[in-house]
Amino acid sequence: MAEWIVGGEPSTDLWDVDIRRFGSFTGNRKALAERTGETLGLHYAMRWPRQELETARPLRTSPLYDLLSAKGAEFGSKNGWERASYFKTNGQARPEHTLDQPGWLPWMVAEQRATREAVALYDQTSFSKYLLQGRDALAVLQRLCANEMDMPVNKMVYTAMLNERGGFESDLTVMRQEDMAPTGFALPPEGASPAWGGPAPAYRFLIITGSAQTVRDFDWITRHIDGAEYAVLTDVSALYSVLSVMGPKARELLGRVSPDDLSPEALKFSWTKEIDVGFARVRRA
């Protein structure tokens, strides 16, 4: 703790006492009152593996929440988001908690088999999403990330985000989007000749990280943007849904709802592009 206070970061993992594991929504007084009563009531109770707290829920839900509920989804909570843990079949009740093999295991095995042999849809909207924008956005990523971040537009890179000791702070998926139009102020880009007089281009990156990392990764990136750099990080987690279509028949399923070319030749591995799905315009990766 002393190293953390004096040096700005601890020399070991102290996530369990890191206040950045909480979102601002957890300060709601009504939710705190209900959750405090529940947790104190469970203090001497039997705590079961994978047992979820039940107060102040649902709090954050994806657009598919009602649909998944109707399909028998049993939800867990991650950073306030309701996420489907498994699906009850044939209208069965939620299995009792146990220290033995959980009653929902056969249902989950069937879900995994469907993914491997056919197709399955996973709602991963709870992932944290940021937009990093500005003239120096690329320089910030190059400094913080282990991978090469100077990539073409629509390229996607999975990378570690490291600290000064070379240790992991997070792992991210970063997509480079179209550069933004110049904002009008004439600042030369790095390496430009003294005679250059046009406005600087502005980079734009969409960053995807874990559900529990929203506050911590946002803090880590923003505190490492130098005061002289033009780069702005915005939390856009609630503005985007993330749906993963997985399995050997995933392309066939998407082909029923999209007129675009979904072949591997049209979209190579680690690239993204916008396609039509029904009446929606989505980014396929």
Image: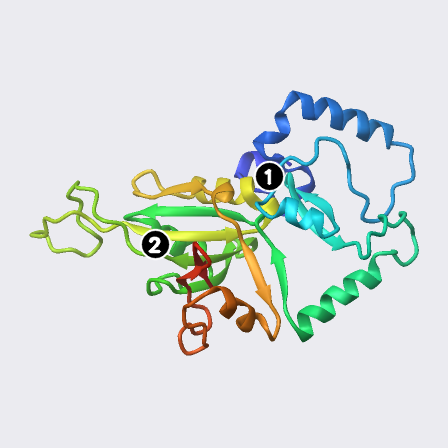
Horizontal relation, residue 215 to residue 133: left or right:
right
- Under tag 1, what secondary structure? helix
Q: Nearer the viewer, residue 87 or 217?
A: 87
- Under tag 2, what secondary structure? helix
Horizontal relation, residue 15 to residue 51: left or right:
left
Instruction: Name above or below for residue 136 compared with residue 276.
Output: above
Instruction: Name above or below for residue 284 compared with residue 32.
Output: below
Q: Amino acid at mark 1?
A: Glu
Sequence-wise, which precedes: disc 2 or disc 1?
A: 1
Q: Residue at x 46, y 65 (%)?
A: 258
Q: Nearer the viewer, residue 173 or 269?
A: 269
Horizontal relation, residue 178 to residue 164: left or right:
left
Q: Are marks 2 and 1 in contact (CB under 8 Å)?
A: no
- Disc 1 designates what residue? 3
Quarter of the image for residue 43 reads: top right
- Spatial separation of the CA atoms under disc 2 and disc 1: 30 Å
Q: Could one spot residue 259 in this view of the protein?
A: yes
Residue 1 position, x and y percent, is 64, 36
**Label 1: few (<14), some (14–19) or many (≥20) C-alpha neighbours in 10 Å:** few
Q: Residue at x 75, y 25 (%)?
A: 34
> Colour scheme used in the picture?
rainbow
Of badges 2 and 1, nearer the viewer stands: 2
Q: Could one spot residue 14 in this view of the protein?
A: no
Q: Residue furthest left?
A: 195
Residue 200 position, x and y percent, is 20, 49
Q: Residue at x 62, y 58 (%)?
A: 122
Q: Nearer the viewer, residue 251 or 109?
A: 251
- Disc 2 designates what residue? 138
Q: Amino acid at mark 2?
A: Leu
Residue 285 position, x and y percent, is 47, 64
**Label 2: few (<14), some (14–19) or many (≥20) C-alpha neighbours in 10 Å:** many
Instruction: Name above or below for residue 191 compared with residue 4.
Output: below
